[in-house]
Image (spheres, grey):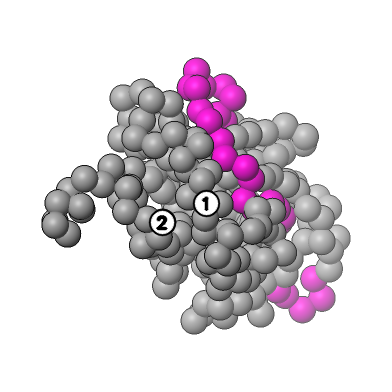
Amino acid sequence: MASGAAAAQQPVYVAAYDFPPFFSDTLETDVTTELVDLLNTSQSSYEFIIQAIPPNGRYQALSENGCCDVILFESPIWGWQERALDIASTLPLLKGRERLVTKKVAGRTQAFFDNLKGKTLGGVRGYHYLMAGEILDSAEVAERYDIYLADSRITNVRMLLGGRIDAAVLNDELLSALRNASVNYLDQLFVSEQIEHEYEMSVLIAPNKNISRDEMQRLLRDLARDGRLDTLFARFNLQRFQIYRR
């Protein structure tokens, strides 16, 4: 009977790209992996399965013929409006922020961030950035700025500390989660006081796939009501970014 129940579960494929702390294979754990575990243990109708993809592959992943049904912790403003995709969204879960970060050096002040001319920036392929009031994808940013595009923000951090780039755009959620990491990067970083970009993250759901927007919202609501969503965000020091609560 247990085997039959498991076979009756509807698979839901979760697109996940490197976006720490929400998904990363360079950290001990991440929010997406733990939320998927919670979703799978809290109900028996669906089996959520992570499918790792590159950042610029997420639009194809949620297309009609794509591999996946949902993507967690994604903002609709990150290039989705330009695609002819009928994507649905749950209520926002978290509000995130990005800012410039550099290596901590004796005597360095906030004035370092006032002028980026002559400085090499670090970014991630497939990400979107708010530059001069405009949301640009990484390829467009590379056309206008001196930027090195890596495969991960953790790579950006390591390049900063190694002196290979001068500054990088990092998200506050990652900086907050790094307080729980085994490697202490924060003592070596100098963070801009200026917020560059703010965004809200929710779950995006592809149309006509294995789960509806209403069902996805119901599952999240159940996790919020019994406190498990709060506990998950607290594990990654994300409480101050949390929008959706019980």
Looking at the image, residue 173 sits to the left or right of residue 240; the answer is left
Q: Amino acid at mark 2?
A: Leu
121 part of magenta stretch: no
Looking at the image, residue 47 sits to the left or right of residue 88; the answer is left
Residue 214 visible? The answer is yes
What residue lies at 64% left-to-right and 45% top-to-bottom? 92
Quadrant for residue 231, please give it: bottom right
Q: Amino acid at mark 1?
A: Leu
- Count of residue discs: 2
Quadrant for residue 176, please give it: bottom right
The stretch in magenta equals: 79-108
**Residue under pointer 1:** 220
Q: Secondary structure at mark 1?
A: helix
Residues packed near mark 1 inside 10 Å, few (<14), some (14 to 19) or many (20 plus): many
What residue lies at 43% left-to-right and 48% top-to-bottom? 17
Quadrant where the N terminus is found in the figure? bottom left
**Residue under pointer 2:** 39
The answer to whether mark 2 and mark 1 are in CB contact below 8 A is no
Earlier along the polypeptide chain: callout 2 or callout 1?
2
Image spot of residue 85 (x, y percent): 48, 22
Image spot of residue 214 (x, y percent): 51, 37
